[in-house]
Each structure stands twice: as C-alpha cells, then as structure tokens.
C-alpha cells in the first residue's frame, strides 16, 4: 500500500495533467468563440451544455452524476468567461437563493448584477443591462411567485432555462444563542415556509418582511436583537452565526427558478430530448371553454406538468391560465397541440421553451 506522501505526489501529478487538458479545452473553446463571432451565434447555449453534461454522466465514473454536472458546469463557465462572461441579473444582495440558482446554471465565472426586486431583474434583462435574469417562479410548498408570473406575461423576455434548488432555511444572527431575539427578518415566502417553527421556538418575536432573505440577513447585522431566515451562503456573506439549521416546516422544500433573456440575445434553445414548454392562455367566459382548452393536449398525447390560473387584470372575473408541457416546441406532437390550442384561445403567448 502506498504511503500518504506517495499518494499526494501522484495526486499532484494528476492535477498537473488535468490543468494541461483544461488549458487545451480553453484553447478549443476560444476557437469556438471566434467562429461564433463570425456567424453571429450566441456564446451561451444551455441546450448544448445540457447535452455535454448528460453525455459525461452517461460515460460511467466513480463520481456521482451531480458531482460531474457541477465540475463540467464550472469548466464550461470558466471557458466562456475567457471570451465574455454573461452578465446575469438576480434578486440580491449577494447571498440569496437566486444567486445560488444563477451560479448553479451559469457557473461561478458569470458576471453578477444583484437587483433589489424581481421587477428590477426583469427591467435589467429587458433593457440590456444584463444578458440574462434569474427569477423565482414556483415553490413546492407555497406555490407560484405571483409577481414573476405577472411580469412574464407583460415582458418582452422569454424563458430559456430552468433551475430547481433545494431550499434550506437557517436562523442567523450576530450571536450563537437564540436568547433575546425580538425581530426575525425574512422574505414573505421564507417566513411562510418557517411559520410553524417560528411559532414554536420564537412565538413572541416580530416577523418583518424583507425584499430578499439576504437583505434580511443584512438587516440582522444592524441590531443584536434581530435574526434572519436565510441560507448558509448569506451567513458567510454577512458574517452571521447559524443559530438553528433547516428550520423550514417541509423537509423537501424546493424552489424553481426561471432563466430569462430577450429573444435577440438567445432564441429558443434547440431540443435536447428532455425539454419543457411554458405558455399562458385565456379563453372566453363560456360553458365548456376550459374543457376545450385541454382537448388538444389529450388528442396529440402531450403531457402537462402544470396548469394554474391567475386573475387577468383586463376585466373582472376573467383568468389567465399558465401551462407547462413536456416536450419541445418543434416536436411534431407538441407543435400540433399548440396549433390547435391557439385556435381555441382569446389570448395565447409562449413564455419559453427550455431544457427541463
């Protein structure tokens, strides 16, 4: 059996080989970037990167699939940054789950643009201040993020990516003790997701709404009697102690994020074999209208993963329906279902098509 010093020497040698190969890959990526400049292709292709990761995961390795995905995403992010890092807007400040979702999708070499609100993320993306935006769209326990849905309907951006993030809420403050906490800051969704825990352990503490969990963590740095619900990343960012871990009421608490951009920045991604389509429609208020809305999907064998209504702002007691479908917009069955669906709608808009 080799000794620890011998093993470290071998690891150092492998690391040097890896670096040499990474430099070769970076050189090839640079050539790809030059070709893309000539033909006007987008630098970032989420469909292509999803295919690369899936191929590497299928090759067989001692590494877990999620480990392979994380490694290759960072490699591709670092290579893209040699050309021009993508400027990505997200709900800030730094340390939010939105930033974590953005880095999970783009890698840590992305350019960061923290925003004060979801509205600002949309404005930055639509105006060109950022190439992409990352916004929360749905939580597994609290449902859809209403403001995101309204802005998707009204904005000129579309969805090109999708990130599902396991959310672990922690109670953070300046000291390590829970004694003397009079105020707890958190985003409304986080406060709702932790309400049973807060009622049991801090029943007399005031709950104050923050624009984001990271902003709540920042507020907690200003007052020793305050605490915040936020991620461990936010605790590191603002130098706070973790008083209690994973205080969310539901163990399997996930938030889904949408990656958005203007169509001229990136058209709809090419099919990967594992895709989704999001759209919003409305129908006339007449008997059987909702039933007729669902018939094209059944007729053409297209599965729905979400069907949700939101009040339309155009008139009283009228609704928009947000639908997620399995497949790519270019798939024969999906295209046929959408063509038939459109004829039955008073309003119809595809919000995006992206790797699922």
Image (cartoon, helix red, strand yellow):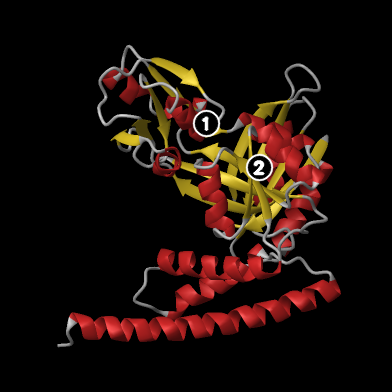
Which image quadrant: the N terminus? Answer: bottom left
Q: Which mark is residue 282?
A: none
- Per the image, label 2 sits on a secondary structure element best described as strand
Q: Nearer the viewer, residue 213 or 324?
A: 213
Which image quadrant: the C terminus? Answer: bottom right
Residue ID for mark 2: 323
Look at the image and tell me whether residue 291 can be seen: no
Residue at x-position 55% and y-position 60%? 107
Residue at x-position 43% and y-position 28%? 221
Mark whose residue sits in front, 2 or 1? 1
- Classify 209 as above or below 114: above
- Classify residue 129 as left or right of residue 208: right
Q: Residue lying furthest top in this view?
A: 204
Q: Are marks 2 and 1 in contact (CB under 8 Å)?
A: no
Q: Residue 119, how many percent across, how many down? A: 70, 33
Look at the image and tell me whether residue 208 can be seen: yes
Q: Nearer the viewer, residue 346 or 139?
A: 139
Residue at x-position 64% and y-position 32%? 117
* Structural distance between the alpha carbons of marks 2 and 1: 32 Å
Residue ID for mark 1: 215
Q: Residue 77, how many percent across, how many down? A: 59, 65
- Classify 176 as above or below 64: above
Badge 1: few (under 14), some or many (20 or more) residues near its Cα, within 10 Å?
Answer: many
Q: Nearer the viewer, residue 349 or 8?
A: 8
- Classify residue 330 as left or right of residue 73: right
- Classify residue 180 as left or right of residue 227: left
- Per the image, label 1 sits on a secondary structure element best described as helix
- Classify 141 as above or below 276: above
Badge 2: few (under 14), some or many (20 or more) residues near its Cα, within 10 Å?
Answer: some
* Marked residue nearer the N-terminal end (2 or 1): 1
- Classify 9 as above or below 221: below
Residue at x-position 75% and y-position 58%? 268
């Amino acid at each position: 059996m080799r000794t620890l010093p011998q093993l470290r020497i071998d690891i150092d040698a492998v690391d040097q080989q890896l670096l040499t190969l990474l430099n070769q890959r970076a050189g090839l990526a640079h050539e790809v970037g030059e070709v893309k400049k000539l033909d006007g292709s987008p630098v970032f292709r989420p469909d292509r990167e999803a295919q690369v990761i899936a191929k590497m995961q299928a090759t067989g390795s001692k590494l877990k699939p999620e480990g392979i995905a994380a490694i290759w995403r960072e490699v591709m992010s670092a290579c893209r940054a040699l050309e021009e890092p993508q400027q990505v807007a997200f709900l800030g400040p730094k340390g939010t789950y939105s930033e974590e979702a953005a880095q999970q999708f783009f890698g840590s070499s992305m350019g960061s643009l923290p925003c004060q609100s979801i509205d600002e993320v949309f404005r930055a993306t639509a105006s060109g201040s950022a190439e992409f935006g990352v916004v929360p769209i749905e939580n597994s326990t609290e449902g859809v993020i209403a403001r995101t849905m309204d802005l998707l309907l009204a904005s000129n951006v579309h969805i090109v990516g999708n990130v599902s993030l396991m959310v672990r809420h922690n109670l953070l403050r300046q000291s390590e003790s829970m004694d003397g906490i009079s105020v707890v800051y958190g985003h409304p969704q986080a406060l709702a997701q932790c309400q049973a825990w807060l009622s049991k352990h801090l029943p007399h503490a005031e709950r104050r709404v923050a624009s984001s969990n990271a902003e709540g963590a920042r507020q907690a740095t200003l007052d020793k009697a305050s605490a915040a619900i936020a991620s461990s990343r936010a605790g590191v960012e603002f130098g706070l102690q973790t008083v209690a871990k994973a205080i969310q009421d539901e163990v399997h608490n996930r938030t889904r994020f949408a990656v958005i951009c203007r169509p001229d920045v990136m058209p709809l991604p090419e099919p990967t074999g594992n895709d989704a389509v999001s759209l919003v429609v409305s129908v006339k208020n007449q008997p059987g209208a909702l039933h007729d809305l669902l018939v094209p999907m059944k007729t053409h064998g297209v599965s729905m993963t979400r069907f949700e209504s939101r009040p339309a702002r155009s008139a009283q007691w009228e609704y928009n329906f947000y639908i997620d479908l399995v497949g790519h917009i270019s798939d024969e069955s999906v295209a046929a279902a959408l063509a038939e669906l459109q004829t039955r709608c008073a309003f119809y808009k595809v919000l995006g098509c992206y790797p699922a």
